Image (cartoon, rainbow, N blue to C red):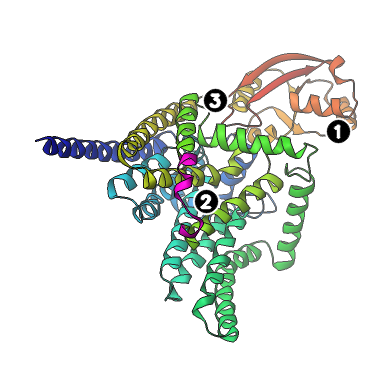
Amino acid sequence: MMNMKKLSLNALFKTLILLVSITSIVLISLWRFHYAIDLPRSWDQVDFALALSRFDLYAMQPHFPGYPYFVLGGMVIHKWIGNPSLALSTFNSLILLSSSIPLYFLSRNILSKTISLLIVGVLQSMVFLNVMSIQPMSEAAAVGILWWYIWGLHVAFQRKASSFVLLLPSFLLSILLGIRLSYLPFGIGFILLLISRRSSYTSNKTYALFISVHLFIAICFQLIWVVGLAASEGGITAFLELALGFSSGHFQEWGGSAVSTTSPLWIRSYELVVTNIGWVGLAGQRLYIAAMITIMIIGFILLLNKVSRQSITPFQWTYGIMFALYFLWALFAQNIDKPRHILPLPGMVLFAVLLFTTKYSEGFRAHLVKLGLVMLLLFQSFGTFTMMREAQHPTAVHQLSSFLSEIEEPIMVYTWEETRVMDYLDVHYEHDRVFTYETFLSEIPYYDERRIFLTDRVVKGFEQQGAPIRKSVTKVGAYYSDKMYDPVYHEIVLYEYKR
């Protein structure tokens, strides 16, 4: 009798897990489509939206390297959805939803069908991932393809007798880089896959031929989109000039990399690990989610003694190396002020922790882990819903534009990146970017009949140049939006210049 009750309780719990998992995946997918952002809210988002009507890297539609597969996907959706921002967000959502398939098969390799579906639900419900999915940016689509690529690597590692299967990760890597070139560090996974095949060849000559053939095929896959971009921009020479100009700016001037900023390494490391990966990426800026994931990670650490070095498979080593290499890339070559650059890392961490703790937990602890996963899924789904609703509120830059549009007298507005969004909105007032105080002083005599406004970025920039600008400006207003959506321009202060 006791065994019958135990079996019925297990069946009930299993049914509950399936119901919660499927319901959450369906609801989150519907929310992504419903709450997709319809107006670009940043410089980069405007770049992508404009690219659907005219693809032109010189005009920064979008900026280099063009993200051709992402833009192509948006163009296809744009045939049915007229709003370009919505078209790109919808493409994000479709690709991200499709990643449930490789996530399920990766989990199913070591776990039951029920728990595998639960883990898919947890990964799909991550708050920051969903925040990015409803924006017209390429990160969410790239993460979706990244999971397909990781699954392709796993399949190739399992089927050691077949060389044909290597074409799968090779092709998926080209799609990944055609959506987001900054995911290049994940290419180490394909290199390690080729290295792992060394034992299958008896001579160096045959192994060298094998390496040469598959590297050539991988390069050809990449050339599909690279040659297409070069042709669209007037040839290889013009394309290389664009590439060198972008690389120089990104790594030495405006890109926020370790080279272009003066922040100490320990501060960058803290921002990357604690703020971007931990608080934003994993917890979605929610204390209750942070507490749940912390408990999961503690459980993961306590179970580490159950794993010997010999039990780690070549694929698992590759997974860890890809994570480590992209982590270093994010630390040294990406903009720490923009958490979206770490988007692959939180999911990879959480996926590994969940698989590990679920696989090695036994008895009563195993039931606690499953219950914890269900609670985490529910907490994340709630956090995702509240954050998606937040996206419907006007951004700081849109609020600023609305205020300025209501001013009936002639005005001139000096901004930094905000002007790109104002251009897209086709506002009636005059505005322009300005970087130096000297340029500003030389221009204002031409606007004697206008009121002159400056945003806080302009004022701070002038102050850094030693200009006594504070004496000549008065604060007009301040505009705010959610920092998770607008990490840099979530607060904009408007000043009026008094001659």
Along the viewing direction, whichever of 268 and 179 lies nearer the viewer: 268
Label 2 crowd bin: few (<14), some (14–19), many (20+), radius 10 Å: many
Asked if the magenta segment contains residue 309, the reply would be: yes
Q: Which residue is mark 2?
A: 142
Residue 436: mark: 1
- Distance between the Cα atoms at labels 2 and 3? 27 Å
Q: Is residue 240 left or right of residue 70?
A: right
Between marks 2 and 3 in the image, the one whose residue lies nearer the viewer: 2
* Element carrying mark 2: helix
**Sooner in the amino-acid sequence: mark 2 or mark 3:** 2
The quadrant of the picture occupied by the C terminus is: top right
Residue 34: mark: none
x, y (%) of residue 50?
59, 46
Which amino acid type is shown beneath numbered disc 2?
A: Ala
- Residue extent of the magenta highlight: 300-311
**Which residue is located at x 62 percent, y 26 percent?**
490
Name the magenta segment's main secondary structure.
helix
**Which residue is located at x 78 percent, y 37 percent?**
264
